[in-house]
Image (tube, rainbow, N blue to C red):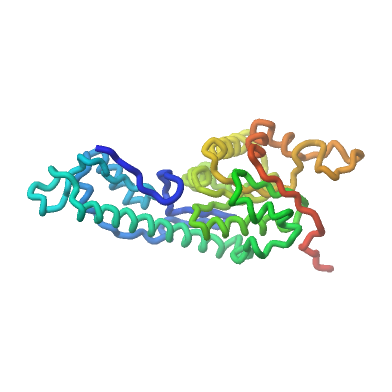
Amino acid sequence: MTITAIAAGDPDDRDPHLLAQAGSRRTDPDDVPRADLGEPAWLAALSSDARAKARAALERGSNVVPMPTSPGDACTCPKSGRPGQHPLCPACQRARKETAESVLAQQREFRHTAWRRNLEGTYADYADATLSGLRPEQNLDGRVSRWLDTDSRTLVLVGDNSLGKTHAGFAVCNEAIRRDMWVVAWNVADLNDRLRPGGDIRAFEFAERCDHLFLDDLGAEKLSEWTLEQLYRLIDARVRNRRRTGISTNLPYDRRGFADTPKEQQPVTPNMIDRYGARIVHRIMHEATVVRFHGESYRKPVPW
């Protein structure tokens, strides 16, 4: 029997019940409604191992549902006379397709629901961020707004504080959601906190496997050998699987600083190479689009 994974988009076996994490807000899987699909009749046509995998996929709402598709698959329709011993009839084929499409539609809704709830928390200010609303200095030569349509797999937004990097990053996230992508966003310091023992055991898996991951404020987190290892594992997995990643940071690439950094101000520290090492930084920069942000801070201190 041939088992085919029917899925929308990238054919990964992924759990969509907690599809967006950001800031200090945690989305509990119990907050996301699970559809009670029952157990479809076509499960009886599978081998015991395949049946267990399919049942587990339906139970956790997996975005990949194993479906029997080879000509020798058994029909579960009572009209066949001996259910489970005849090839699939057209009615059973349609029923299986409708079941898979129903599951996938619900998973798409789960993704959107989780992202909307995520934006009600720490990142509520960016709920309405759009690519069309970016200022020219946030979208130099259209490199941010066009990035999802390019072959570049990493978008690095770099510049001083309060220039709109996070806003631009969430504009990309919101557009990715509109395109029905699985999006996860994390402040890097908060992600490290959730990865520690006693945190969210699913945080790394979702950050590793989502279609688009946005890591906000890289460089503001406290470093240790453990956090460097987690960052390496995460970046390496996403590069190897060619998944899209957005990063915002204040750090220049190396001690030379930015292109307009005067020589008398060099060497510039901290910088990405000194802080994270070439092994991590070279992976981040692989096939990357780098957008440098300029201008004055939009956050103005209140006199007191």
Q: Is residue 41 above or below residue 268?
A: below
| Foreground residue among 299 and 199 | 299
Which residue does the image show at 46% across and 57% down from the upper left? 111
Which residue does the image show at 15% across and 52% down from the upper left? 77
Residue 153 image point, x, y percent: 60, 43
Q: Is residue 111 above or below residue 49?
A: below
Residue 84 visible somewhere in the drawing: yes
Quadrant location, the N terminus:
top left
- Figure quadrant of residue 54: top left
Task: Tell whether 294 sits left or right of 123.
Answer: right
| Foreground residue among 70 and 113 | 70
Which residue does the image show at 55% across and 65% down from the upper left? 120
Residue 172 image point, x, y percent: 61, 56
| Foreground residue among 205 and 144 | 144
Tally of numbered tags: 0
Task: Tell whether 40 sits left or right of 232.
Answer: left
Q: Is residue 17 above or below residue 119?
A: above
Residue 26 image point, x, y percent: 52, 56
Task: Tell whether 7 sits left or right of 252.
Answer: left
- Figure quadrant of residue 272: top right
Q: Residue furthest left?
A: 81
Q: Residue furthest right?
A: 264
Residue 189 visible somewhere in the drawing: no
Residue 132 image point, x, y percent: 65, 63
Quadrant location, the C terminus:
bottom right
